[in-house]
Image (spheres, rainbow, N blue to C red):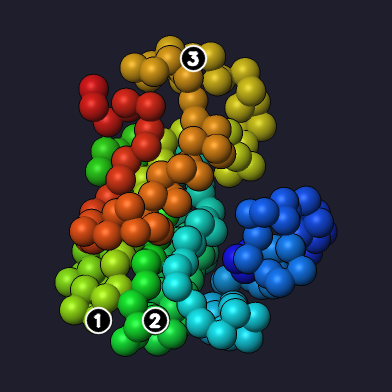
């Protein structure tokens, strides 16, 4: 496994905490590579690092993203719109492109992160909704294009999950959790571990006849 991200210190902590029985490096560690995916060259560098470490690329889970809340599109600047698209859509395109170049013709599995807001809207999220809707459309297109080459492409669409992204533009997120949970059929918000199982499922052969789909994991929010 190769983990990437912008924070070198957190990557080092991840690498040092990896259990030997769950890692894929020969020395029992997770390989890490620091990269800022807003840079156009970074996705190619990430894939090159994986190929250099393991000799091949079997799967990709891409979860980098940004969000703006309380947005009024009348006052969204071109720069703000571009920032959202650069990280949420452009980086996704570039990383998928680099991964496909490595996977074809041997096959593989790509999991891109969509959102419940790709299918239902909420006030103040226009840029985010647009970017995640585009990601899920891209998933369907790539599934059709590269299925014959043995590459599956699916999306994981989370609801509200307690990650650092949840605190963006709402530092009082902890005070809001109880009210948010009350509005969900399962009466709790998501935790990072709630995303791990579905991501592994989509990545693995357990979903070998599944492509072009978006798996919504949102505590039942979109079922209402």
Q: Is residue 17 left or right of residue 201?
A: right
Count residues near mark 3 (Cα–Cα under 10 Å), then give few for <14, some for 14-19, many for 20+.
few
Residue tagged by mark 3?
Answer: 179
Tell me the residue at 66%/32% (across/down).
171
Quadrant location of residue 30? bottom right
Quadrant location of residue 11? bottom right
Residue 52 location (% of width, % of height):
63, 86
Residue tagged by mark 1?
Answer: 149
Q: Is residue 24 left or right of residue 205?
A: right
Mark 2 vs 3, N-terminal side: 2
Mark 3 vs 1, N-terminal side: 1
Q: CA distance from mark 2 to mark 3?
A: 44 Å
28 or 180, which lies in front?
A: 28
Tell me the residue at 26%/38% (across/down).
120
Q: CA distance from mark 3 to mark 1?
A: 46 Å
Mark 1 vs 2, N-terminal side: 2
Q: Quadrant of the C terminus?
A: top left
Q: How many marks?
A: 3
130 or 30, which lies in front?
A: 30
Residue 34 location (% of width, % of height):
71, 70
In the image, which disc is placed on residue 103? 2
Count residues near mark 2 (Cα–Cα under 10 Å), then give few for <14, some for 14-19, many for 20+.
many
Tag 2 secondary structure? helix
Residue 84 location (% of width, % of height):
48, 60
Residues marked 2 and 3 touching at CB (< 8 Å): no
On screen, residue 131 above or below 148? above
Tell me the residue at 45%/51% (across/down).
200
Mark 3 or mark 1, which is nearer to you?
Answer: 1
Tell me the residue at 23%/27% (across/down).
223
Answer yes or no: is residue 77 visible.
no
Residues marked 3 and 1 touching at CB (< 8 Å): no
């Amino acid at each position: 496994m190769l983990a990437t991200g912008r924070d070198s210190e957190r990557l080092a902590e991840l690498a040092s905490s990896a259990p030997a029985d769950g890692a894929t490096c020969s020395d029992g560690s997770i390989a890490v590579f620091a990269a800022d995916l807003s840079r156009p060259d970074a996705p190619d560098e990430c894939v090159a690092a994986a190929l250099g470490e393991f000799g091949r690329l079997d799967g990709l889970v891409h979860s980098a993203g940004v969000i703006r809340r309380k947005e009024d599109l009348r006052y969204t600047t071109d720069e703000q719109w571009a920032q959202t698209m650069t990280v949420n859509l452009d980086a996704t395109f570039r990383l998928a492109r680099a991964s496909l170049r490595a996977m074809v013709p041997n096959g593989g599995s790509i999991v891109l992160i969509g959102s419940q807001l790709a299918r239902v809207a909420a006030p103040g999220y226009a840029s985010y909704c647009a970017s995640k809707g585009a990601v899920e459309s891209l998933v369907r297109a790539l599934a059709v294009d590269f299925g014959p080459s043995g590459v599956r492409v699916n999306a994981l669409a989370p609801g509200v999950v307690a990650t650092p992204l949840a605190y963006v533009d709402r530092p009082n997120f902890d005070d809001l959790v109880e009210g948010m949970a009350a509005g969900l059929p399962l009466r709790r918000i998501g935790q990072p571990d709630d995303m791990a199982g579905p991501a592994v499922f989509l990545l693995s052969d357990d979903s070998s006849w599944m492509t072009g789909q978006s798996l919504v994991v949102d505590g039942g929010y979109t079922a209402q």
